[in-house]
Image (cartoon, rainbow, N blue to C red):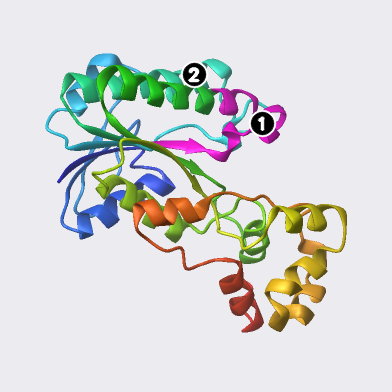
C-alpha cells in the first residue's frame, strides 16, 4: 500500500511511518522540515500551500494527516515555542482542508486524520484555538465523507507528549496513553479498509463505570482504585499524592474492537511496572 504521512518529523509521525515501512508498505513522509526515517522517503513541504498538497497526494492509497500544532504551542505568555492563532489556523485548519482536497483530486479513497480529546467541551477554556482547530477539522471529516465519498477515520488522541514514567502512569486515569499504543492504534486505522466514517477515542482504557467516576471525583479515590487493583493497595496509598482529581471515561473498547487491536500498556500494566521498581 502507498501511504502519505504528514508530520513525519514529529514524535508520532516518525514512529508511525517507521512502523508502516517495517510492515512492508511504501511510505512517503512530508513535513515543514526534512526528516530522516529508515525506509521512508521524506520530503520538506509547506502544506499550507494548496498545490503542494495536491502534488503530495498523487499515487497514494491512503493519506494520514498527522501534522499539527498542539497544546504545547498555544499562544501564552512566556511560552518560547508559542504559535499565533493565525499560525494555528494555517497549520491545523488550512493544511487539513488542502490534504482532504488532495484526496479528492487524486482519487485517494481513504484519509486518517489526527483529532484530539480537546474536541470535548471540558477542554475548551484551557485549549482555545487548538480546540477550535480540531472541532473544525472534525466537521471537515464529515463534509468530505458526505460530499466526496472519502472513507475517513479521525483519531481523538489523548496525551502522549514525553514526560516521566510516574506522570505518564497516573495520567492514564485522565487521557494519557503510551506512545507505543498510539502508534499501534494509528497503524491499525491506516490499514483499515472497511470503516466509512468514524471518530475513535485513543486513550488508555479504564474499567470504571459512571458510578465509579462519580465516586472517584467526590469520594474516596483509593477505594475506587483498589476495587479493581487490590493487589496494589499499598502501592496506591504510597503514591496517593499523584492521583488526579478526577478520571475521564472514554469508549476505547469500541476503538479496539472495530480497528482490531488490543492496548496492552494500561493502568494495571503501569502499577505492575511500578511495583517492580520502575520509576524512570
116 with respect to 257 (left or right): right
Front in this rendered view, residue 231 or 270: 231
Q: Main secondary structure of the magenta part?
A: helix
Q: Name the quadrant containing residue 141.
A: top left
Query: Is residue 108 a member of the stretch shown in magenta?
Result: no
Q: Which residue is mark 2?
A: 89
Residue 7 lies, in percent from the top left, at 36, 38
Residue 47 lies, in percent from the top left, at 32, 23
Q: Name the quadrant containing residue 143.
A: top left
Residue drawn 59% across the image and 28% down it: 131
Residue 217 lies, in percent from the top left, at 81, 53
Q: Nearer the viewer, mark 1 or mark 2?
A: 1
- Crowding at dot 1, Cα within 10 Å, few <14 / some 14-19 / many 20+, comes out as few
Q: Examine the rendered structure and indicate whether residue 262 appears above or below residue 13.
A: below
Q: What is the CA distance from the residue labelled 1 to the residue labelled 2?
A: 20 Å
193 with respect to 216 (left or right): left
Q: Are marks 1 and 2 in contact (CB under 8 Å)?
A: no
Residue 34 lies, in percent from the top left, at 29, 37
Q: Regarding mark 2 in the picture, which secondary structure is present there?
A: helix
Q: Examine the rendered structure and indicate whether residue 250 appears above or below residue 100.
A: below
The answer to whether residue 60 is seen in the rendering is yes
Residue drawn 28% across the image and 27% down it: 45
Q: Which residue is mark 1?
A: 121
Front in this rendered view, residue 246 or 278: 246
Residue drawn 21% across the image and 48% down it: 40
Please report the bounds of the magenta region as a residue range: 113-132
Residue drawn 79% across the image and 58% down it: 216
Quarter of the image containing the C terminus? bottom right
Q: Name the quadrant containing residue 61.
A: top left
Q: Examine the rendered structure and indicate whether residue 17 appears above or below residue 135.
A: below
- Is tag 1's residue or tag 2's residue first in the polypeptide sequence? 2
Q: Regarding mark 1 in the picture, which secondary structure is present there?
A: helix
Amino acid at each position: 500500500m502507498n501511504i502519505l504521512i504528514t508530520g513525519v518529523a514529529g514524535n508520532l509521525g516518525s514512529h508511525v511511518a517507521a512502523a508502516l515501512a517495517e510492515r512492508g508498505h511504501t511510505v512517503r513522509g512530508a513535513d515543514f522540515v526534512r526528516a530522516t526515517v529508515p525506509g521512508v522517503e521524506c520530503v520538506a513541504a509547506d502544506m499550507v500551500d494548496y498545490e503542494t498538497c495536491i502534488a503530495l497526494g498523487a499515487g497514494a492509497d491512503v493519506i494520514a494527516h498527522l501534522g499539527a500544532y498542539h497544546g504545547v504551542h498555544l499562544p501564552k505568555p512566556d511560552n518560547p515555542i508559542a504559535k499565533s492563532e493565525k499560525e494555528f489556523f494555517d497549520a491545523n485548519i488550512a493544511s487539513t482542508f488542502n490534504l482532504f482536497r488532495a484526496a479528492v483530486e487524486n482519487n485517494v479513497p481513504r484519509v486518517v486524520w489526527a483529532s484530539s480529546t480537546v474536541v470535548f467541551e471540558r477542554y475548551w477554556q484551557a485549549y482555545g484555538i487548538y480546540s477550535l482547530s480540531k472541532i473544525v477539522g472534525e466537521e471537515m471529516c464529515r463534509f468530505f465523507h458526505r460530499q466526496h465519498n472519502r472513507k475517513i477515520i479521525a483519531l481523538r488522541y489523548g496525551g502522549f507528549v514525553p514526560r516521566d514514567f510516574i506522570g505518564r502512569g497516573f495520567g492514564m486515569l485522565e487521557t494519557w496513553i503510551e506512545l507505543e499504543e498510539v502508534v499501534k492504534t494509528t497503524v491499525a486505522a491506516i490499514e483499515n479498509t472497511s470503516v466509512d466514517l468514524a471518530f475513535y477515542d485513543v486513550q488508555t482504557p479504564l474499567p470504571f463505570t459512571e458510578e465509579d467516576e462519580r465516586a472517584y471525583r467526590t469520594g474516596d479515590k483509593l477505594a475506587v482504585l483498589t476495587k479493581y487493583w487490590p493487589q496494589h493497595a499499598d502501592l496506591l496509598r504510597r503514591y496517593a499524592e499523584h492521583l488526579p482529581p478526577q478520571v475521564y471515561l472514554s469508549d476505547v473498547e469500541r476503538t479496539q474492537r472495530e480497528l482490531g487491536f488490543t492496548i496492552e500498556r494500561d493502568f494495571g500494566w503501569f502499577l505492575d511496572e511500578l511495583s517492580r521498581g520502575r520509576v524512570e
